[in-house]
Every structure is written in structure tokens, then in C-alpha cells.
Amino acid sequence: MREYYIAGNWKMNKTAAESREFAEQLADALEEASVKLMIAPPFTALESVSSIVQGTNIILGAQNMCHETSGAFTGEVSADMLLDLDVTAVILGHSERRTIYGETDELINQKVRLALTKGLEPVFCIGETLDEREAGRVEDVVRTQVTKGLAGVSEDQLKQVTIAYEPVWAIGTGKTATPDDANAVHAFVRSLIRELYSDAAAQAVQIQYGGSVKPDNVRELMAQEDIDGALVGGASLKLEDFKKIALFKK
Ligand code: 13P
């Protein structure tokens, strides 16, 4: 049985003080959760949130990371800087990084491999745009993203990787993939992992769904065979909503 993994991507929201207060509320509210939990505040709030989630059932994630270890990369944050703040997980290849900042599969692959070498757990994001879906290219797009993004990642390293399937057209739009449509892509991703690695790796890999996950659709999504969790944006910024999502099993 794969464990469910629910993560909150706060994106570019909340100051350090706001993040600290929210993390305190979450730590109390989510004590009873029986799933793996992660929150990813902005970089500027990692330090303050780190001390709050210490010793709780919430792990700390970052939203991005530089593909190189140090040096002349103005504006970037390194893996060691994240580790220094007790960050455990890092979201890589988010569609906003791909589309707004032009991150390529090759760059994302460098980040994934570096994160793994450093002992960070990547949450590796994939997903098609609306145009790609309408052109019937979902499997092509996802195949390329998975194959290139995980190139050079060993089967042993893959155990630390979570894949997040986030159809770009469902992010922040209120449009969710139907549970069946989402599950079909998740099953396809799992079959790719079987092809690239092994049946055991395919059975074990956790695949989160992301894109307008809310309290009223989380149960149906999580009931799908190949959906193992959620990467939540907007609803992760609201205490009651994220609580209901994280406690969806109750
Ligand atoms: P929303 O939940 O706001 O659609 O965002 C999803 C997302 O991008 C999480 O990484």
C-alpha cells in the first residue's frame, strides 16, 4: 500500500510573519492527519517556518532550487542553503517555472539529480497544457517530461522522488481533471516507470495530482487507484480548506 502524500505549495504568498503564524495554526490543526504532509512556503519564510514544523508531522519543502551547487547565479538558492534550514523536500519543474521562466526538461533533470545527490526529496512536476490536451498529445508530452526529467536517476534514488501530475489548464482555474481523466494519466505515468525501471518501482512510486484540489473534490480524486496524494495551491493557503484536504480520510 502506498502512503498518501498531501503537500501545500504556497507559491508567492505570505510574508515571514504571516507564514509563521499560519504554520503554527497548521501544526495544531493537522496533528491527527494520517498522511504524509509537506508545506512549501516562499524562500523568505523557510527559516521561520522551519522552527515551527520541527518535531511535528509536517515536513518542510521549498518551491525551487538552483541546478548548480554555488557560485555566480544571481537570485538563486542552492541545495545546501535549503538543507541548512532543515528543508526536506523540493518542488521541481512546476509548470509556472516551465512556462513563465522557461525551465527546460534538461534543466529540471539537473535539479532533480542534484537534489537527490544532496539528500533532498524532489516533488517532480509534469503536466500538459490545454492546447496539448486538445491536440491529443497528453501521453507524448508526459512521456517526454518523465523520460527527460528522470534521466540518470537510479531505481534506488527514485524511491525519494514523488511525481506530481498537474495539468496546466487545471491550475488555479477552478477546473479539475475528472477523477477518471486524472487517473488515466497517473496510470500511464506508472506504466512509464514500469518501462523505465521495474514493476516494483512502478508500484512504489507516489504520484500526486495537482490542479484546483479542494475539500469538495479531494475524496473522489484520492479514491482513484493511481492517485496517491495532492499538490495543493490555492486551497493550501486557507486553514479550513487545507485541513479538510489533509484529513480527507476522516
Ligand atoms: P491550485 O491548487 O491553486 O490549482 O494550484 C495547483 C498547483 O499549482 C500546486 O502546485
Image (cartoon, rainbow, N blue to C red):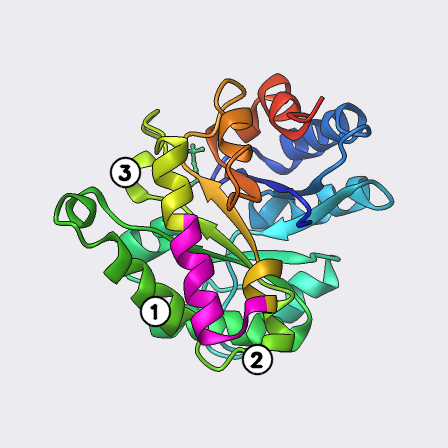
Q: Where, by quadrant of the figure, is residue 149 drawn?
A: bottom left
The residue positioned 83% from the left and 40% from the top of the image is 56
Q: Which residue is mark 1?
A: 105
Q: Is residue 126 above or below residue 129?
A: below
Q: Amino acid at mark 3?
A: Trp
Q: Which residues are magenta?
A: 186-199
Q: Nearer the viewer, mark 2 or mark 3?
A: 2
Q: Nearer the viewer, mark 2 or mark 1?
A: 2
Q: Is residue 144 left or right of residue 9?
A: left
Membership of 171 in magenta stretch: no
Q: Is residue 53 above or below residue 204?
A: above
Q: Where, by quadrant of the figure, is residue 159 drawn?
A: bottom right
The answer as to whether callout 1 falls within 8 Å of ligand 1 is no
| Residue 226 appears anywhere in the view | yes
The residue positioned 44% from the left and 78% from the top of the image is 151
Whichever of callouts 2 and 3 sits on the residue coming sooner in the sequence is 2
Q: Which residue is mark 2?
A: 154
Whichever of callouts 3 and 1 sits on the residue coming sooner in the sequence is 1
Q: Position of residue 21 (x, y in %)?
A: 71, 27
